[in-house]
Image (tube, helix red, strand yellow):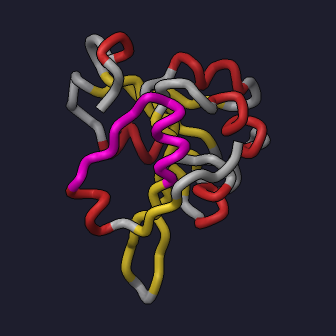
Amino acid sequence: TWPAADVPRGALRVCGVGAGMAAALARAAAGDPAVVVRPVAGDTGDLLACDVAVFGDGADIDVHYALVRLAGQPVLTVGGTDAFARDGGMIALVTRDQHVTFVVNLGAARRGGLQISSRLLQIATLLDGGAP
């Protein structure tokens, strides 16, 4: 959940970062008027207009710099590696033994003012802290 002052109004703004990520997200959200998907490439400042930023493989921006820039902002950051969470991403979806698991960086979520569902936390690997 987002802090009261930053609760997404209207459609949830989901940004896809990386080759094909926005297209994949748009297919998943097809027909849902509550979700607006847009691609972000190059300018990390565009990420500040997102409610959720999903970083895919082959992101054409400096992911570490983007996470530093988003630190403390109410933008849920999602990536696909343990390193993403250690570098300050909030949630990483990681494949282990042919199963998708969650890594949650509690410190990053706290700094952004976001609260992660207790149900997700029960099944996730938790990091407390992490950069920046």
Residue in view at x 30 percent, y 15 percent:
4
Based on the picture, tell me whether residue 8 belongs to the magenta stretch: no
Vertical comparison of 122 with 18: above or below:
below
Q: Split into 4 quadrants, where in the image is the N terminus?
A: top left
Is residue 21 at all visible to an observer of this figure?
A: no
Q: Residue furthest bottom?
A: 97
Vertical comparison of 45 with 69: above or below:
above
Give the mark count: 0
Residue in view at x 41 percent, y 64 percent:
102
Based on the picture, tell me whether residue 117 belongs to the magenta stretch: yes
- Left or right placement of residue 109 versus residue 82 in this view: left
- Left or right placement of residue 23 versus residue 62 in this view: left
Q: Split into 4 quadrants, where in the image is the C terminus?
A: top right
Percent of width and height locating residue 34: 23, 24
- Left or right placement of residue 44 versus residue 53 in this view: right
Vertical comparison of 116 with 126: above or below:
above
Percent of width and height locating residue 41: 69, 31
Most foreground residue, 18 or 107 = 107
Percent of width and height locating residue 78: 49, 47
Residue in view at x 58 percent, y 20 percent:
48
Magenta residues span 105-118
Is residue 50 at all visible to an observer of this figure?
A: yes
Most foreground residue, 23 or 100 = 100
Residue in view at x 49 percent, y 69 percent:
94
